[in-house]
Amino acid sequence: MITIITSETDPASLNIKEELLKLGMQNVIILKESLIYAESLDKKFNSDLFIFASKHSSSAGVASLSVHFPGNWNTADLGGKERLLCKASPLRMKEAFLTLNKLASQIPVTLEATHHGPYCNKPCFFIEIGSSLEQWKDKNLGKVIAKTIQETATKKPKKYEVAICLGGPHYCNNFNKIQLETNIAVSHICPKHMLPFLDNEMLQQAIKQSEPQPKFALLDWKGLGNDKKRIIDLLEEIKFPYKRTSDITKD
């Protein structure tokens, strides 16, 4: 059972919803509140996977399509709960990422680091149109997202290796390459600016809050900054294997 969550407050979400209904998609839920504040939907709806269809905003206003997991490494400034990560669905999100790249050659596709709400303890991810009203209402982009959701929801995902990802920028250039070019499915991503909040508790949570659970960590080596030694020590303390992205693809 896969449920697609949309919102009346979000023009991109409404655009995607219309295209989903044209495709005959079932289990499309329309909420009155903003998606990032739609807390604990797993307690309200019986579903194995929640896909949040949403807008993406950025100050640069760059057109893009993106996917990411919800959750907060520190404070809950935009929904969710403080220092709680949602249950990630890395296999399904990888399939969505690959499909977006196949269907949307005219616009950049990117992973984003784990951020914002709502809190959901069932596998979930966000799929978004960015980054301004022009793109949010673009029917072609709405169709691309809707077709991606349809394909992701109806096709059994392949088996991939799963990894948590640490370091680098919010828009994850090195992890994008991994997701696109290898047999690795990206789970939760803690970017460089959130690494100071990554302690043993949050590291363990990032590993456990994924279905299936990751077997190793991928490190954006140059993107670990001053936290590099501390992060390595944390991983070695719990005997969790790690690899550099540059060991797998060229940075």
Image: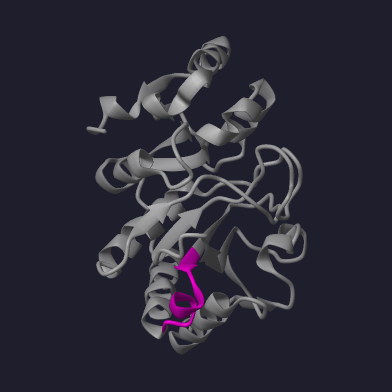
User: Which of the 4 quarters of the picture holds residue 200?
Assistant: top right
Is 116 situated left or right of 56 in this image? right
- In the picture, the quarter occupied by the C terminus is top left
Residue at 39%, 76% (x, y): give it.
141
Is 194 situated left or right of 21 in this image? right
Residue at 35%, 24% (x, y): give it.
244
Foreground: 156 or 164? 164
Q: Residue furthest front?
A: 60
Q: Residue furthest left?
A: 250
The answer to whether residue 202 of the structure is visible from this angle is: yes
User: Where's residue 32, x and y in %?
Assistant: 74, 78
User: Where's residue 222, x and y in %?
Assistant: 38, 25
User: Where's residue 25, x and y in %?
Assistant: 50, 80
Foreground: 220 or 47? 220
- In the picture shown, does residue 48 fall above or below 165? below
Residue at 60%, 58% (x, y): give it.
48
- In the picture, the quarter occupied by the N terminus is bottom right
User: Where's residue 149, x and y in %?
Assistant: 44, 69
Point out the stretch of residues depicted in magenta: 128-138
- In the picture shown, does residue 101 fall above or below 84? below
The answer to whether residue 160 of the structure is visible from this angle is: no
